[in-house]
Amino acid sequence: MRRLTVRAANVADVPALVELRLANAEAHLALDAGTYRVPRREAVVRHFAGMLTDEPGRDAVLVAETPDGRVVGMVEVLRLPEPPEHQILRPEPSAQVHTVVLPDARGLGVGSALLEAAERWATDRGITYLSAGIHHRNVDAVRFYSRHGYADSGLSLGRRLH
């Protein structure tokens, strides 16, 4: 996409961020209604408003904006806690990334620009490992992250208790 700007989100972006989150929720609901839900709009507004005003610099929300000012995508970079001293995992500064691009802006380089900016943001803050939690049926997301060097990093097993 020509002349796309990727920048830190601000409070004025909250309405666009809410729409991105809710559209993404609808798409995920179609993948697996037993796992995903569409959150209440008010909860999403509170999340982004709080994230953009609380403890600046801990986590990031970056947006992709077209020359006419339209926000067409976002990426969240959410720091993960280090394992406690009593656990066997080595501590490593890490974060999870979550990229969302509006359907009409997909395939135009928006997601790539967002992910590259997220990786720069993380690197600048000493984060050495990024993960992307993706549902196995979301083949487009798996393909996207794989193209950017993300690979299977393990298996998460679970069991629903009744």
Image (spheres, grey):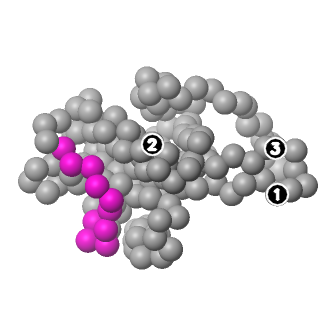
Mark 2–mark 1 distance (CA, rounded to whole Å):
25 Å
Give the residues in magenta: 4-13
Residue 118 rendering spot, x and y as whole percentages: 42, 46
Q: Image point 90% across, 55% down: which residue?
A: 86
Q: Quadrant of residue 2?
A: top left
Q: Which mark is residue 89?
A: 3
- Seen at 69% across and 57% down, the residue is 81
Q: CA distance from mark 2 to mark 3?
A: 23 Å
Residue 143 percent across, percent down from the top left: 45, 24
Q: Earlier in the sequence, mark 1 or mark 3?
A: 1
Dot 1 amino acid type: Pro
For residue 143, which numbered disc appears in the image? none
Left/right placement of residue 82 relative to residue 132 reads right
Is residue 112 depicted above or below 28 in this figure?
above
- Residue 151 image position (x, y, % from top left): 58, 26
Which of 112 and 94 lies nearest the eye of the viewer?
94
The CA span between labels 1 and 3 is 9 Å
Instruction: Name which residue lies at 26% across and 33% down.
Output: 109
The percent coordinates of residue 30 (x first, y second) are 46, 41
Q: Secondary structure at mark 1?
A: loop
Would you place residue 158 above or below residue 14 in this image? above
**Residue 119, numbered circle:** 2
Is residue 18 found inside the magenta-colored segment of the image?
no
Label disc, if present, on residue 84 of the rendered structure: 1
Whether residue 43 is visible to the viewer of this picture, yes or no, is: no
Whether residue 76 appears in this view of the structure is yes
Give the amino acid type for the residue marked by disc 2 in the picture. Glu
Q: Residue furthest right?
A: 86
Figure disc tally: 3
User: Does residue 61 lie above or below 88 as drawn?
Assistant: below
- Residue type at tag 3: Leu
For residue 8: magenta?
yes
